Amino acid sequence: MTSEIFSVWFLMGAALVFWMQAGFAMVETGFTRAKNAGNILMKNLMDFCIGTGVFILIGFSFLLGEDLLGFIGKPGFDIFTNYANFDWSNFVFNLVFCATTATIVSGAMAERTKFLSYCIYSGVISALVYPIEAHWIWGGGWLSQLGFHDFAGSCAIHMVGGLSALIGAKLLGPRIGKFEKDASGKIVKVNAFPGHNIPLGCLGVFILWFGWYGFNGAAATSVEQLGSIFLTTTVSPAIATVTCMIFTWVKYGKPDVSMCLNASLAGLVAITAGCDVTDCLGAAIIGIVAGLLCPFGVWLLDYKLHVDDPVGAVAVHFCNGIWGTIAVGLFATTTAPGNDSFTGLFYGGGIALLAKQLLGALTVCAWTAVTITIVFLLIRATVGLRVTREEEIMGLDLPEHGLANAYADFVPAINTSLESADLSVAPAPFGPAAVDEAVPVVVHHAPVKTVKAESTGVKMTKIEIVCKQAAFDTLKNALMSVGITGMTVTNVLGCGIQKGKPEYYRGTLVEANLLPKVQVEVVISKVPVRTVIETAKKALYTGHIGDGKIFVYDVENVIKVRTGEEGYDALQDVE
């Protein structure tokens, strides 16, 4: 590969990695609740922007400056003092990787973190935590001198971001209502908070997978090596996803959508360290383990560690970052193009490389755990990490950003029962109004007159039908066939669950969920009530749970506004 072609591909790879910021934003937004969507998008935007500022000042020199004792790069300001000879491409390439590390933390701490606090620790990760350990691996530091191998960042990026996320989520505490405790304070129940937009999360996964070809492949030095990297970067996540689908299908009775989306990312994380030194078989085995580690990690955090991670960042990035780092020592093979020095245990290389990989993972974990814990504790002691209970229940969009709703002209129905369950009184969002601003409440007690329609003499009945959205066309046509041409149709959300039919979200039992329904209302007098009921039953019946319900009410009167007709006469153009 010529130097010109390599340089162009190198920068194209950097652009693909930058595009992954959109993927992270979509995954995190989709897997959380609508009332926090704007806050999450803002955090993912500022990850990169704040990271760029601090990476210019100190991060880049700490990462790739002249090595000092194998620990840190020498601080310098060549980007300002010697711009004509500065390594612009290398700066941009390493910047987009740096921003990824901070982004990972956002998901695990979503929905209850102060925006100011997030900006602070995101900047510290990009300025200090990531650049120093990355110098050990890629900047000529002691791990690279030892022979540690992490081609694209399972250890340097994903494990570091995932461990920071774990520590941050633990110090921050769970979202209100996530865990229920008994009188002694013991956690006895885990509640599911389903993401509000799984299609958005799925789009984010596909964006990330696409960008990952640049993430893993940008540093390839030959066309053959690039092709091999693309292969392993495809095989591992694909096999991981299939593995997770089978596991959740067997475990919970149905394949879990969001868990399988996480598994795709887990397979990508796991192959990142060894994408250049593994073959197809090694990538497949790495993917199988990643596909099992993902649901295991989610279960471990929920049911054993009791750490609330809304998007599965710890399971995806920390668990599989460690696994991917170790996997190099097991599956590295010289049959991979461009690799003539790394051989894993399963390919006859002994334990030497495996020992180096374990040492690297342990030391980088130690560095990350100590530094990020200090950062979080300092933030908590000064500006604070967590928003107030009222702000959390309201959603962070409004109190943190003045954004009433991230979805214009649509106010989502939000189930806050779990959140408000442990609040004796849910306070008003902005406090009580001043006395002179309060609107007096006037209660009128007037006699209610019963007015009979003069033109009636025939009973009028309102029939309300609630059914699945997919069944509406069938119902509409059936009602029209018996003479009903006018009806009111409303999209509604139904809340409930059938007894004996448990549903799971990410391995956690969902006790009540909001499901889209259609509510159809008709008022009749000429068409017999029983005819409408039987017609609706025949149209909606499938024999499965959720076919719908029919409600019947007496109607006192009907008035047509245009003509003034009342009762029976007012209904004659719709039945």
Image: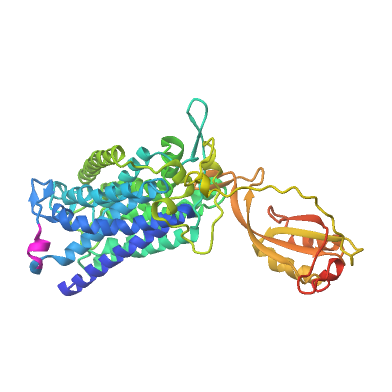
Is residue 81 part of the magenta span, yes or no?
A: yes
Q: Nearer the viewer, residue 213 or 495?
A: 495
Residue 528 to residue 153: above or below: below
Res 139 quadrant in image: bottom left
Q: Is residue 93 left or right of residue 486?
A: left
Q: Nearer the viewer, residue 241 or 526?
A: 526
Residue 61 visible to the viewer: yes
Range shown magenta? 77-83
Is residue 129 part of the magenta span, yes or no?
A: no
The residue sitting at the front extreme is 436
* Residue drawn at the location 36% of the way across and 62% of the way down: 22
Residue 202's x, y, as percent? 45, 60
Q: Nearer the viewer, residue 301 or 392?
A: 392
Q: Is residue 265 left or right of residue 7?
A: right
Count of number-bearing discs: 0
Residue 47's x, y, as percent? 30, 56
